[in-house]
Image (cartoon, rainbow, N blue to C red):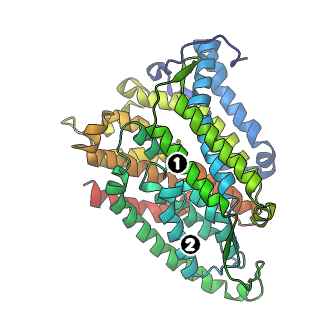
Amino acid sequence: TLLAASAASAAEVDGARLGFVWSVPFIGILMSIAILPLVTPQLWHHHFGKITAAWAAAFILPYAILDGVGATAAQVVHVMLGEYIPFIILVGSLFVIAGGVHLRGNLHGSPKTNTILLAAGTGIASITGTTGAAMLLVRAVIRANDERLHNAHVMVFFIFLVANIGGSLTPLGDPPLFLGFLKGVGFFWPTVHMLLPMLLVSAIVLAVFYVIDSHFYRRDAAFRARRDPTPDTPKGLSIEGGINIWLLLGVMGAVLLSGIWKPGIAWNVMGTEVPLQGIVRDAVLSGLAWASLKLTPPACRAANAFTWGPILEVAKLFAGIFVTIVPVIAMLKAGEKGAFSAIVHLVTNPDGSPDDVAYFWLTGSLSSFLDNAPTYLVFFNMAGGDPAQLMGPMATTLLAISAGAVFMGANTYIGNAPNFMVKAVAEENGVKMPSFFGYMLWSCAILLPCFLLVTVVFFR
C-alpha cells in the first residue's frame, strides 16, 4: 500500500520534532538480535525475518499516521532505492563471487598458520573490500581449524581484522570510506592517513591473537591427534574457481567507476534521485554475480559448503535496520534541536573547534550499533562537510571520523555487514560462535585498549 501511494517529496525526516520514543523500533531490532537467539533460539532461527518486519512496521505505521501515507512511502522508497538495494547488491555480489573461490587442500590451523591467514586477509581487505576478503578466506580458515576443539576465537579475530580493520586504506575497503570518496575525499587520502593507525591496531591484535591461539592450540593437542575432518592432499594447496578472482576485480572496477563517472543523468522516483551511474553499477554487479554462478564449477561451491543462508539473513536483518534507523539518523542530524543534542556539545570544544577525541569515540560507538556508513556521514556533515577543509586543516578530525567508523564496526556483530555473514557461515560449518554479548566481551577486552592507544597516539 505504501509503495503504491502517489508520488511525494522525499524530504528528509525532521528529526527536531521526533522524541526518543521513535528510536524504540531500532533498539528493538538490536535487542532482538542480541537476546532472542539466547532465550528462544528455535523461535529466532525460524522467524527472525518476521520479527524484523514487525519492528520495521513499528516505525512505518506510526510515521504514516504522523506524516501521511505518501510521505512515509517516499521515505521507504528513499531508503530502499538510495541505500539498501545498492548495499545488498554490493554485499551479495561479493558473497556470491568470493564463495566460488575454493582453496583446495588442507591447511593445519597452527598459531603461525592462522596468524599468516589473518594477516593476509587484513592486507587484501582494502583491495577487495571487507566483504570480499571475508568471504574469500572464511571457509579456508574454518577448514584449517576444523580439527581443533577451541576454534571460535579464530573467527572472532577474523571478524576484527579481515571484516573491519583491514578495510581502512581505500574507499573500496569499507562503505564509510566509499561515501567519503563520493563526497569529495581523495581516493588515496585514507591510504596516507589511515595507514599508521591501521598498522598499529593490526599489529597489536595479531600479536594478541598469536598468544591466545598458542594457548588454545596446546590445550587442543590430544583432541587434534584423533580428529581432522579435512584430509591432506598429495598435490598440496591449489586455487579452484579462479575465474572469480577476475570477477572480483570487475566488482572493484564497477564501484570505482560509479564514483568517478558522473554523466549528470538521473531519474526521480517519489522524490529519490536515482543516478545513471548507480543503475549501471548495480547492473554490472548483478551481472558479475550471475556470471560467477554460471562459470564456477559446481564442485567449487559444494566444496565450500556454499549456501544462501548467510546472505539471506543479512538481507532480512539489514532491511529492518535500514528502515528503523531513519528516525535515529534524523535525530542525530537535527543537532542541538534533536533528541540527541548532547552529542553535538560533546564533539565541540568551548572555543568552537572540533574535539577529535570525541569524534573518534562517538563515531565509533554509534558505528558499533548503527550502520557505520550513515553514521560516518552524520559526523562528516557535523564537522562541516567540506572535503577540502576536512582533508586540509581539519585532517585529524576526518581521520578520527574515518577510524572510528571503520575500526569500531568490529565491536559488535551488527557493526558491519560482513560480521554477521562470517558468523552465519561459521555456524553453518559447526563453529560455536559466541553470543551477541559474548562477542562483545571479546571486543571490549581486545579492541578497546587498542582504541585507547590510538586516541593517545593520534588524537591527543
User: Residue 120 in the image: x percent, y percent?
Assistant: 52, 69
Q: Is residue 11 left or right of residue 39?
A: left
Please determine whether, in this image, residue 103 is positioned above or below residue 307. Answer: below
Q: Is residue 20 left or right of residue 384?
A: right
Please determine whether, in this image, residue 287 is positioned above or below residue 3. Answer: below
Identify which residue is drawn at 36% across, 51% down: 188
Please tell me whether mark 1 sits on a helix, a strand or a loop.
helix
Of the numbered discs in the image, which one, if any, rests on residue 253? 1
In primary-sequence order, the first of circles 2 and 1 is: 2
The quadrant holding residue 203 is: bottom left
**Amino acid residing under circle 2:** Leu
> Closer to the camera: disc 2 or disc 1?
1
Quadrant that contains the N terminus? top right
**Amino acid residing under circle 1:** Gly
Residue denoted by label 2: 117
Please determine whether, in this image, residue 57 is positioned above or below residue 160. Answer: above
Please tell me whether mark 2 sits on a helix, a strand or a loop.
helix
- Alpha-carbon distance for marks 2 and 1? 25 Å
User: Residue 69 in the image: x percent, y percent?
Assistant: 65, 13
Identify which residue is drawn at 46% across, 36% down: 261
The quadrant holding residue 6 is: top right
User: Residue 224 in the image: x percent, y percent?
Assistant: 71, 85
Please determine whether, in this image, residue 17 is positioned above or below residue 208. Answer: above
